[in-house]
Amino acid sequence: MYLVSVDTNKCTGCGECTEACPANILEVTDGTAEVVGEDCLGCESCVAVCPAEAVSVQEL
């Protein structure tokens, strides 16, 4: 199981993470990405594409 976090202070709301996520657990709302699902695959695609380094994935 993996936990995805978005640092809202760093996030610019570009949407790169939402497009990269194969599990579709991220969504941009009100100009900031947020986690909207629990089925993270742990691939870290969202982390790799985030230009602001606002997304992190932690294995639980």
Image (tube, grey):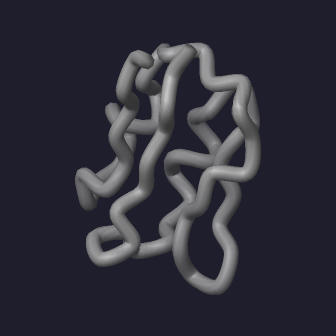
Looking at the image, residue 15 sits to the left or right of residue 26; the answer is: left
Q: Nearer the viewer, residue 58 or 14?
A: 58
Looking at the picture, does residue 32 appear above or below residue 46? below
How far across and down, in percent of the image, does residue 22 sit? Answer: 69, 24
How far across and down, in percent of the image, does residue 42 sit? Answer: 50, 16
Residue drawn at x 46%, y 27% is 45
Q: Nearer the viewer, residue 38 or 44?
A: 38
Looking at the image, residue 46 sits to the left or right of residue 1; the answer is: left
Residue drawn at x 70%, y 40% is 25
Looking at the image, residue 31 sits to the left or right of residue 26; the answer is: left
The residue most toward the bottom is: 30
Looking at the picture, does residue 4 appear above or below residue 31? above
The residue most toward the front is: 60
How far across and down, in percent of the image, does residue 7 sit? Answer: 34, 63
- Quadrant of the rendering where the N terminus is positioned: top right
Residue drawn at x 71%, y 33% is 38
Residue drawn at x 36%, y 27% is 58
How far across and down, in percent of the image, does residue 39 sit? Answer: 72, 24
Q: Quadrant of residue 51?
A: bottom left
The total number of labels drawn is 0
